[in-house]
């Protein structure tokens, strides 16, 4: 066995250790795929390993639940990956590194992740987000541009609809019960902006460009972001049956004739609800 | 293979040792498995809305607010119509001090059935001044065209005297439409409903009719429910001649009931002008309609109606009762559905000397399968129908039975459609 053969074998055998399980698929809607490395349709409670790409299609969504109970939800047309995950259950401490290449996401750190503040991060094509224990939402791509356009921002001509990122600190807020307030540090284009108040957002128009903001995301902007993350019910009346007038109502003619063109009515006066009608008095068949 | 020197041998031994170590070292996998199994258990416990709410409450009680939120979020991803879960989620967002998102979730519940206890939880977490769901304006409805076959088309609207033994199968063109409009004015609203159905003979007996109805009124939110009143107009034609016109008023009271249902109580009084003055009079009706959606893919209804009609002569007056029910089940992600509905009506006419006594039983069943035509918003619907009328012997009328089939192209629009 040559030195290189032995190294290759070692690398091959080491692969299972590298394919470390970091979480499971906790909720799936429509088309969700996992590439590990070959893409396949995800099933509920499927193990997600370090480096697996999780990809959603149109009108789709998923929630990944990491081993430390951090939750990572993604909306339609998204692509995310857990790049780094360290979890010490004994100390209830963890840190996560994840990347979002496209689509909308909502990241909620667990209590274990709070035990290692500043060691977790999210990465988009244009920004790096240092997490200090928090709830973050965002979107990467054309939807980020669309939402940003509705926020009365002055957008530069250099914005890139493929990689533009919108980052929102959602909480917990300062008045949250029994948990500390969330905070993030967003680095992009050589600048770092700290968001320490829930509801504040930053827009990064493209690679190597500094963040625009912070600004408070409007209700309409938040609604647009949430619409990407999951479906909401629409007001409606539910299932309605189709009325059948001859059954549901007194909607009938007295008969007497027959066949096509027949039906002359009942000259003697139809019994009760079968109205007394004669030929030509209306309600005759044919 | 040529074996190398000492250095090579050391590499071999080190490699084999490393291989063995990698293959037999189980600890990290075991720890991962245990953690993942715990997640599996949490996911299993939150598969139903009730289970998720219970789990989220226990997590929140333990101070794990974000875990509780994640529990409810995964139900909302898979079941956007789990209204009680959304309500519990709204309360949790308030506890996380995200009132903006909480209000958004509450707005998503506008016009939908939610439980009273859920509202109490929201009020406790968000404050009594927290805005109720904003009313939303919308326009929804459906239109359909197609063909219908009836094994006895002749008797569908033609009542035959005993012994006539006349029947005839026929093919007819079928068209129907329904429109619901809701214009929000803060807590008040204006509503408009319109609908119609028409059947035109293509072959076989000329048994044709058109029936249309419209309602326009004003309503106001009443807690989680609403009250509305308006005018009603209906008109029907049989075999291209005026049959009846009705006009009057209605009063509706609608409120959420149970976990995912809604109950509507309705009363109406309409003046009826028939083609024959002997039938003219008033018609008074009270009805209930319960609509339920126990899961994202299942919807059902149960309706009942009591009715009294006046007329110049007792023999044309009647009491009537109707019971209807139906269920619709979505079969796949594309929106393929199966639906079944049934309606039973009993009519008891007044007695008058020298005229035969009359009592009717009317029965109508319809089973349908709908296949969405990808991306067009259209659905091809095939249905089997069964109609049956039974008359008491003294009435001198022939019973009626017909089996039929329908093939329709249905276009549904507006928020009445399933959430996607």
Image (tube, coloured by chain):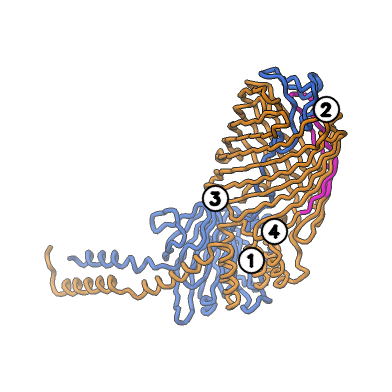
Along the line of sight, which residue is nearer the eye, B200 or B43? Answer: B200
Of the chain colours in the picture, the one used for chain B is: orange
Tag 3 and tag 4, C-beta contact below 8 Å: no
For marks 4 and 2, give the CA distance.
Answer: 42 Å
Label 1 marks a residue whose chain is B
Q: Is residue A71 above or below residue B215?
A: below
**Residue tagged 3:** A58
Tag 3 and tag 2, C-beta contact below 8 Å: no
For marks 2 and 1, give the CA distance.
Answer: 57 Å
Q: Which mark is residue B257?
A: 4
**Residue tagged 1:** B89
> Which residue is most to the bottom?
A91
Is residue B249 one of those drawn in magenta? yes
Residue at 23% over, 71% down: B15
Tag 4 or tag 1, which sits nearer the N-term? 1
Q: Which chain is blue?
A: A
Label 3 marks a residue whose chain is A
Disc 3 vs disc 2: which is toward the camera?
A: 2
Disc 3 vs disc 1: which is toward the camera?
A: 1
Q: Splitting the image into 4 quarters, where does residue A223 fall? A: bottom right
Q: Secondary structure at mark 3?
A: loop
Disc 4 vs disc 2: which is toward the camera?
A: 2
Tell me where the magenta segment starts and ends, as one range. B229-253
Q: Position of residue A138 (x, y in %)?
A: 59, 62
**Residue tagged 2:** B275
């Amino acid at each position: 066995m040559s030195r290189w053969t032995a190294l290759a074998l070692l690398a091959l055998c080491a692969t299972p250790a590298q394919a470390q399980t970091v979480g499971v698929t906790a909720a799936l809607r429509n088309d969700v795929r996992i590439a590990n490395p070959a893409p396949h349709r995800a099933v509920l409670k499927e193990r997600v390993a370090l480096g697996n790409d999780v990809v959603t299609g149109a009108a789709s969504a998923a929630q990944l639940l990491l081993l430390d109970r951090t939750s990572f939800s993604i909306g339609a047309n998204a692509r995310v990956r857990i790049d780094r995950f360290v979890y010490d259950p004994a100390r209830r401490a963890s840190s996560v590194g994840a990347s979002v290449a496209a689509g909308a996401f909502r990241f909620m750190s667990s209590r274990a992740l709070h035990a290692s503040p500043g060691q977790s991060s999210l990465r988009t094509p244009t920004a790096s987000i240092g997490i200090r224990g928090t709830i973050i939402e965002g979107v990467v791509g054309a939807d980020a541009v669309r939402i940003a356009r509705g926020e009365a921002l002055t957008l530069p001509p250099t914005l890139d609809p493929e990689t533009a990122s919108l980052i929102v600190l959602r909480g917990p807020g300062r008045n949250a019960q029994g948990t500390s307030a969330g905070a993030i540090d967003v680095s992009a284009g050589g600048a770092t902006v700290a968001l320490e108040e829930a509801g504040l957002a930053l827009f990064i128009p493209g690679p190597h460009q500094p963040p625009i903001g912070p600004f408070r995301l409007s209700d309409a902007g938040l609604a647009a972001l949430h619409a990407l993350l999951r479906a909401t019910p629409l007001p409606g009346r539910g299932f309605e049956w189709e009325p059948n007038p001859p059954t549901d109502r007194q909607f009938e003619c007295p008969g007497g004739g027959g066949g096509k063109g027949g039906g002359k009515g009942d000259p003697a006066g139809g019994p009760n609800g079968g109205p007394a009608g004669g030929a030509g008095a209306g309600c005759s068949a044919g | 293979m040529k074996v190398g020197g000492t250095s090579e041998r050391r590499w071999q031994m080190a490699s084999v040792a490393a291989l063995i170590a990698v293959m037999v070292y189980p600890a990290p996998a075991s720890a991962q498995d245990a953690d993942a199994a715990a997640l599996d258990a949490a996911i299993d416990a939150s598969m139903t809305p009730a289970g998720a709410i219970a789990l989220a409450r226990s997590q929140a009680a333990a101070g794990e607010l974000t875990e509780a939120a994640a529990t409810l979020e995964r139900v909302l991803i898979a079941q956007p119509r789990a209204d009680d879960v959304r309500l519990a989620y709204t309360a949790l967002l308030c506890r996380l001090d995200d009132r903006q998102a909480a209000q958004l979730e509450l707005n998503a519940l506008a016009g939908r059935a939610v439980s009273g206890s859920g509202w109490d939880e929201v009020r406790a977490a968000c404050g009594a001044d927290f805005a109720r769901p904003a009313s939303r304006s919308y326009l929804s409805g459906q239109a359909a065209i197609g063909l219908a076959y009836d094994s006895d088309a002749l008797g569908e609207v033609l009542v035959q005297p005993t012994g006539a033994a006349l029947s005839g199968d026929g093919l007819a063109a079928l068209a129907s439409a329904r429109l619901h409009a809701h214009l929000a004015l803060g807590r008040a609203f204006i509503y408009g409903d319109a609908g119609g159905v028409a059947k035109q003979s293509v072959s076989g007996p000329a048994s044709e009719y058109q029936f249309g109805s419209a309602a326009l009124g004003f309503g106001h939110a009443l807690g989680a429910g609403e009250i509305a009143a308006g005018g009603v107009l209906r008109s029907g034609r049989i075999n291209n001649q005026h049959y009846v016109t009705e006009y009057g008023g209605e009063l509706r009271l609608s409120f959420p009931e149970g976990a995912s249902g809604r109950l509507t109580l309705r009363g109406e009084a309409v003046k009826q002008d028939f083609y024959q003055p002997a039938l003219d009079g008033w018609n008074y009706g009270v009805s209930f309609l319960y609509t339920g959606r126990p899961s994202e893919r299942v919807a059902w209804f149960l309706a009942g109606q009591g009715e009294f009609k006046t007329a110049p002569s007792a023999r044309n007056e009647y009491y009537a009762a109707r019971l209807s029910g139906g269920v619709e089940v979505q079969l796949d992600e594309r929106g393929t559905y199966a639906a079944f509905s049934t309606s039973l009506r009993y009519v008891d006419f007044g007695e008058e000397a020298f005229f035969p006594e009359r009592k009717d039983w009317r029965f109508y069943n319809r089973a349908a399968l709908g296949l969405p035509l990808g991306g067009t918003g259209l659905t091809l619907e095939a249905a089997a129908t069964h109609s049956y009328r039974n008359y008491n012997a003294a009435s001198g009328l022939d019973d009626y039975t017909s089996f039929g089939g329908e093939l329709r192209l249905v276009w549904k629009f507006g928020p009445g459609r399933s959430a996607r």
